[in-house]
Image (cartoon, grey):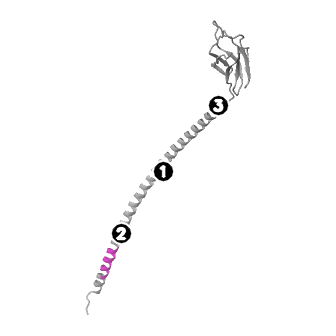
């Protein structure tokens, strides 16, 4: 059997082997290029997702700051309201004078303090002609105390239906109803 030129046949086998290896390397290279391309795409997606996460983190941080500011304002409002409420309660619970005029008998009348606090330096603002004696200067009534005074009405000086009085701590005159005379 004559095979001819053995080196040529060997070269043919080697070249066929080289072609096969080359085709195999080409397909592997193509797969590697595809994988690299996919890797680049995934890296871009990951970078985009990271950027989006940063944006979301900033938004969340801004929202947290706004929420903290609102919470701080709300807390300050609650503290202010609580302080106002305590001040109003203290003012409401503060002892106060509650004066009233009552008829005792004939020309005798009572100025009484039914409040929980004293009324000091009581002054009748009105000029009352029917009053026999003016109230003493510096008239003060503790809670439950009564001051007697006389008023006699006549055609010229009738007993007024209201006496306006003020005292220390009560700068605006308070109208006190004078009840009708009994007997």
The residues bearing labels 3 and 1 have C-alpha atoms spaced at a distance of 51 Å
Farthest residue, direction front: 183
Q: Secondary structure at mark 1?
A: helix
Asked if residue 76 lies left or right of residue 101, the reply is: left
Residue 77's place in the image compared with 24, above or below, is above
Q: Secondary structure at mark 2?
A: helix
- Upstream in sequence: badge 2 or badge 1: 2
Residue carrying label 1: 57
Contact, mark 2 vs mark 1 (Cβ under 8 Å): no
Q: Secondary structure at mark 3?
A: helix
Relative image position of residue 125 (x, y in whole percent): 65, 14
Relative image position of residue 53 (x, y in whole percent): 46, 53
Residue at 63% across, 10% down: 158
Asked if residue 141 lies left or right of residue 59, the reply is: right
The residue segment tinted magenta is 13-24
Residue at 41% across, 55% down: 48
- Upstream in sequence: badge 3 or badge 2: 2
The residues bearing labels 3 and 2 have C-alpha atoms spaced at a distance of 88 Å
């Amino acid at each position: 059997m004559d095979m001819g030129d053995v080196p040529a046949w060997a070269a043919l086998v080697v070249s066929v082997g080289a072609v096969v290896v080359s085709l195999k390397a080409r397909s592997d290279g193509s797969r590697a290029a595809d994988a690299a391309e996919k890797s680049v795409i995934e890296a871009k997606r990951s970078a985009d997702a990271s950027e989006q996460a940063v944006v979301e983190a900033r938004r969340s941080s801004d929202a947290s700051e706004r929420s903290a500011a609102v919470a701080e304002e709300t807390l300050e409002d609650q503290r202010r309201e609580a302080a106002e409420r305590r001040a109003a309660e203290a003012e409401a619970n503060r002892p106060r004078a509650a004066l009233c005029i009552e008829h005792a008998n004939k020309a005798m009348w009572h100025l009484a303090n039914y409040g929980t606090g004293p009324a000091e330096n009581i002054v009748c603002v009105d000029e009352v002609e029917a009053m026999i004696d003016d109230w003493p200067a510096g008239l003060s009534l503790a809670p439950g105390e009564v001051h007697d005074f006389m008023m006699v009405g006549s055609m010229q000086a009738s007993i007024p239906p209201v006496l306006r009085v003020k005292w220390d701590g009560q700068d605006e005159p308070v109208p006190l109803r004078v009840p009708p005379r009994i007997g």
